[in-house]
Amino acid sequence: MINKIFIGDALEILQEFPDSFVDMCITSPPYYGLRDYGVQGQLGQESDFNLYIDKLLAIFDEVKRILKKKGTCWVNISDTYEDKSLLGIPFQFVQGMLNKGWILRNTIIWHKPNAMPINVKDRFTIDFEYLFFFSKNKKYYFEQQVEPVKQSSIKRITQKTFNQQGGGRKDYGRTGINPNRSSRKTLENFAKNFTGKRNKRCVWTIPTKGYKDIHFAVYPPELIETPIKAGCPINGIILDPFIGSGTTGMVAKSLSRNYIGIELNPDYLDLIKSRIDNTIKPLV
């Protein structure tokens, strides 16, 4: 079943899969009321957004069954306006997932520095989307990812904070730390052993990338590289029930992971296979 694309309805296909054999799910479901992919029964074209949420939750019930005990699930989803109001779809989806027993570990903000300008006069331009990180159980596979620390942060960490004034507890300076010998030693040891790296934060600035072929809802590979490295072991299996143009399969292959993709529209199959086949797998 691995490294294959299945064409058809995501819920129906997932119901045929065995229990507990996938390491990770990462996907971006069709957004509600945004695009028509030209296929009957497509997700996102329901008459009411509550029906959309219900269908999504039914699909992720199957995802949860299919995930291994230590599996993780990452969902990129955005909101929709209706009658000038945001519907709150990401929040309602998350609440539904929590009600189903999922554990929400992080809310990640995908900041789009090249977001398209819009000609509206009564609100701000939205330049971000959500990426929700769920786990099936309290103990799950996770490989911590790090990022460089800015020089200004390094300076702040290593400076003599005990002599700073204001803001903290009385007589303890800005830090609120009692300047005794042990706390000084702790800070000095931290500064001495500091590597210039820190755990990755939850706001990721990643430009959007257009794609010239038929599928126009493409998330950038950079958005899912970190989740895949963090949430799936090498040679593990990644599921994308809405694989679209095949980006998840491409990145999985490039990072020495396996993939399973589901796509409703058969017209995308050649595009998906072409993109994945042209991805080079590293020698790991």
Image (cartoon, grey):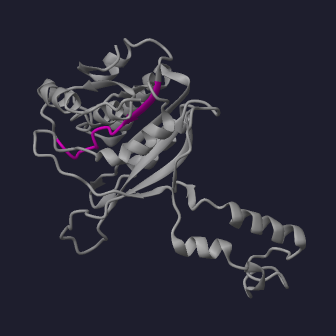
* x then y, percent, for residue 40: 16, 27
156 vs 142: above or below = below
- Residue 149, can we see it? yes
Question: Which residue is painted at 39% across and 35% down in the image?
Answer: 26
Q: Nearer the viewer, residue 267 or 181?
A: 181
* x then y, percent, for residue 29: 32, 37
Question: Which residue is painted at 20% across and 67% down in the image?
Answer: 118
Horizontally, is 25 left or right of 208 in the view?
A: right
Q: Nearer the viewer, residue 147 or 70?
A: 147
Which image quadrant: the N terminus? Answer: top left
Q: Which residues are magenta?
A: 23-35
Q: Would residue 190 be counted in the magenta stretch?
A: no
- Residue 92, can we see it? no
Q: Main secondary structure of the magenta part?
A: loop
86 vs 59: above or below = below
Question: Which residue is painted at 36% across and 47% down in the image?
Answer: 223
* x then y, percent, for residue 270: 13, 26
Which image quadrant: the C terminus? Answer: top left
* x then y, percent, for residue 271: 14, 31
Q: Nearer the viewer, residue 59 or 20?
A: 20
Q: Nearer the viewer, residue 121 or 112?
A: 112
240 vs 227: above or below = above
Horizontally, is 136 left or right of 217 in the view?
A: right
Write down the quadrant of residue 248 in the picture.
top left
